[in-house]
């Protein structure tokens, strides 16, 4: 019998097994049992048990990992214990080391979990960090979660990938940023600043927002060039590309302002108050938008993919191989990602 949607568990992928993903998951369950009660880990049971043993000095006694066979079984695991659906073959994984075996295990967990969410077996997907080089070594052609989930969702919907455009949104307290382009070189990112891409990103934000917040968003747009081009002195993209996209978006009923100088727009958005507060700032490329978000506090940052047919969030940090297995990893960003997924319908 299928569970009703409000009783479906949340899927949480293990992340790269050589990184801090298993550790932050175990710490989240150990320290925030009530919030994690309906969360089910997708990955490898042996890996989770290995990290549990490795981190025994940093975790309360009594926490256990339980293998479950179905999403429904996860809801019956005792509070504070960790339900794990074992979806990958066992492999020798060395904590803190990049490897093809770890990349394959991480990718297999994401693949399995995404397909299960698309079948409505889970109500949302939270993904622990994976390592892009490990994915590449494993022969995975996608550079990261966002592109992989986009392709899986498009396949499920029988659509070409180009017909399911998605965008990355990063959030820290007081600032949300969406990116026009994601994991491409800076040269490619500049080339991606076209009127069509900027307009499409604004439309994706506008369509996605009501499901998360119950209303349409107020959007500020950053320029590409210093001082937003200074009226054409430092570049013409603002005049020829970004401003026309904004104007067209506003004729379609969107609430969009800009382009604003990129060196101040994020600060002004974070400090704004009252009716002037924007819901989100649109950045033209990856680092332009992510540097201010991460500066505000990576421990509370959340990555969310807009445009997918399901809710997907992730911590706003990487695999942290340098501290993996040492009990030093902070689960705060993972917990923020779980809370963000829970708050979305």
Image (cartoon, rainbow, N blue to C red):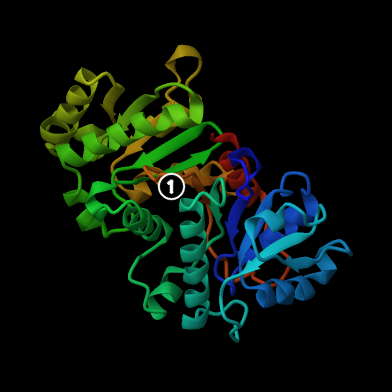
Q: x, y percentage for residue 166?
A: 33, 46
Q: x, y percentage for residue 92?
A: 60, 86
The residue at the point 23 percent across, 33 percent down is 228
The mark total stands at 1
Furthest-front residue in this view: 1
The residue at the point 39 percent across, 34 percent down is 208
Image quadrant occupied by the C terminus: top right
Furthest-top residue in this view: 275
Q: x, y percentage for residue 24?
A: 67, 59
Q: Is residue 193 above or below residue 265?
A: below
Name the quadrant containing residue 138: bottom left
294 or 93: which is nearer to us?
Answer: 93
Q: Is residue 65 above or below residue 171?
A: below
Direction from residue 275 to residue 41 in the image, left or right: right
Direction from residue 29 to residue 219 in the image, left or right: left
Q: x, y percentage for residue 86?
A: 62, 71
Q: Which residue is mark 1?
A: 291
Q: Give the crowd class for mark 1: few <14, some 14-19, many >=20 residues within 10 Å.
A: few
């Amino acid at each position: 019998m299928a569970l009703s949607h409000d009783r479906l568990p949340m899927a949480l992928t293990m992340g790269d097994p050589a990184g801090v993903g298993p550790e932050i998951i175990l710490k989240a369950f150990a320290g925030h049992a009530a919030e994690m009660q309906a969360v089910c880990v997708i990955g490898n049971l042996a890996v989770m048990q290995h990290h549990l043993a490795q981190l025994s000095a940093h975790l309360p006694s009594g926490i256990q990992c339980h293998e479950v066979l179905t999403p429904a079984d996860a809801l019956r695991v005792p509070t504070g214990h960790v339900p794990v659906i074992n979806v990958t073959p066992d492999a020798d994984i060395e904590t803190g080391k990049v490897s093809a075996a770890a990349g394959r295990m991480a990718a297999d967990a994401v693949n399995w979990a995404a397909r299960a969410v698309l079948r409505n077996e889970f109500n949302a997907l939270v993904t622990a960090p994976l390592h892009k080089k490990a994915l590449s070594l494993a022969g995975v052609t996608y550079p990261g979660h966002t592109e992989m989930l986009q392709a899986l969702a498009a396949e499920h919907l029988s659509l070409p990938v180009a017909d399911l455009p998605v965008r990355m949104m990063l959030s820290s307290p007081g600032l949300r940023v969406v990116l026009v382009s994601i994991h491409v070189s800076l040269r490619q990112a500049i080339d991606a600043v076209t009127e069509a891409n900027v307009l499409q990103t604004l439309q994706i934000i506008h369509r996605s927002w009501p499901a998360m917040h119950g209303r349409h968003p107020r959007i500020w747009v950053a320029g590409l060039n210093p001082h937003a081009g200074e009226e054409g002195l430092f570049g013409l993209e603002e005049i020829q590309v970004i401003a026309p996209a904004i104007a067209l978006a506003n004729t379609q009923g969107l609430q969009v302002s800009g382009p604003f100088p990129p060196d101040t727009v994020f600060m002004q958005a974070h400090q704004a108050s009252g009716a002037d507060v924007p819901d989100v700032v649109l950045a033209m490329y990856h680092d332009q938008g992510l540097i201010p978000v991460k500066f505000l506090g990576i421990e509370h940052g959340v990555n969310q993919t807009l445009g997918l047919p399901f809710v997907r969030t992730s911590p706003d940090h990487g695999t942290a191989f340098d501290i993996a297995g040492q009990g030093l990893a902070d689960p705060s960003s993972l917990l923020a990602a779980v809370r963000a997924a829970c708050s979305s319908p």
